[in-house]
Amino acid sequence: MKSKPHLRQMHKATKAIHAGIGDSVFGEVSVPIFQSSTFSFPSAEEGAARFAAEKTGYIYTRMGNPTINALEKCIAALENGYAGMATASGMAAITTVCLALLDNGAHVVSTASVYGPTHTVLEKEFSRFGVEATFVDTSNLDNVKQAIRANTRMAFIETPANPTMAVTDIHKAAELAHLHDMIMVIDNTFAGPYLQRPLDLGADVVVHSMTKSINGHSDVLAGMIVTKNEKLYQRIKPVLNLFGGTMDPHQAWLVLRGVRTMPLRVERSVENAQKIASFLMQHPKVRWVRYPGLPDHPQHTIAKKQMDGFGAMICFGVKNGLEGGKTVMNNVRLFTLAVSLGGVESLIEHPASMTHATVSRNERAQAGIVDELVRISVGCEDFNDLRDDLDQALKRIQR
Ligand code: LCS
């Protein structure tokens, strides 16, 4: 499951291109798509040995597949983790980790401003199995401390958080979690492994929606789980195999193709995002901007310490509140009005009525997801065109 040792020592841009790419059969440079649901055994004895885990070798694609494994090795190498487990979607990664690590009667402390469905699944679905969740602003660790109970087993932290861009100190949060024998899970989707490696900072498990910047082309859904050690891997892997939220080989191949250009895409989009954030800051129609790369972001210093770049996500509020935000969303011509993020194209959306609509109004307010908040995902277009598009849309705000 581990990638080649020499690649582990290499830099992240090299890993994105080479990690997981195994020995070729015909000299092929791209990993082939092993579009096979099952694998033949040379003998009955060999089949039995593989099932008994006495011998390695493929059995059935839900349990393992060469194309999927290549992607798992690549992301595990990028995250400096023990091993990866590819999933059908980011939500499959999150629910699999919770199914594997939370028992009836357990309690989770989660970032309040998490992706809406993560909030909903923890609050409304896992409660059916006797798992309780408390949502707090984890950027202030005192809130986490106060929420911890005798039965708290997990801290589920999203940083930067969707959509508020609040940043949690991963190292300090991990110390706190471990002091209370809790497992620390980080949703690393917003930053991605190129900008932030939570396992290096003390986290136990990382989850990703690879639908975002890892794949980067808005054409595939995918998720990944990476653990820091074998023990956690052995707890999660059987649950993934049994519950079946696994990936398809073709899906894995598409993400492998995407990840190879991730360093270039991420560098470009982060550069654009920093410039867009500064542009918005001084725009007369903009009331406030949240971007970890701006010195006025409340956790700018922490972001600087734990991230290699501040990401491509920005949220902001404009004059005339929600009405003003709608004017911007309805008048952009280059930005696409759509949920999701991390693609080469820039997107704009309204969390309160879209990505976080399943979270109650009250809980949204507590998490800082105010009605006027507009979220953008900055892509790889030319900055000047992005700026001009936002400018012409902002100028249409009446007040
Ligand atoms: N975690 C985070 C932080 C996310 O932003 C998303 C999706 C997921 C997990 C779930 O991943 P999926 O199952 O969709 O691959 N975020 C979305 C968003 O903000 N807009 O649309 C999807």
Image: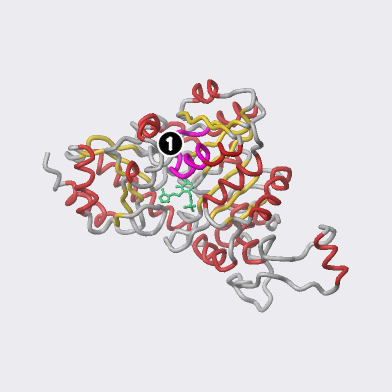
The residue range painted magenta reads 110-124
Q: Nearer the viewer, residue 250 or 230?
A: 250
* Residue 217, above or below 36: above
Given the current orientation, which residue lies at the most extreme front position? 128
Q: Position of residue 80 (x, y in %)?
A: 62, 47
**Disc 1 designates what residue?**
113
Apparent side of residue 52 relative to residue 113 in the rendered image (left or right): right
Q: What residue do we see at 51% from left, 50% from top?
A: 194
Q: Position of residue 115 (x, y in %)?
A: 44, 43
Amino acid residing under circle 1? Ser
Q: What residue do we see at 30% from left, 43% from top?
A: 374
Q: Quadrant of residue 177?
A: top right
Q: Position of residue 172 (x, y in %)?
A: 56, 28
Q: Position of residue 134 (x, y in %)?
A: 51, 29
- Mark 1 secondary-structure assignment: loop
Given the current orientation, which residue lies at the most extreme right position? 45
The image quadrant where one finds the C terminus is top left
Q: Nearer the viewer, residue 263 or 334?
A: 334
Magenta-drawn stretch contains 278: no
How many C-alpha atoms fall within 10 Å of the one at disc 1: few (<14), some, or many (≥20)? many
Q: Quadrant of residue 250?
A: bottom right
Q: What residue do we see at 17% from left, 52% from top?
A: 392
Given the current orientation, which residue lies at the most extreme bottom position? 26
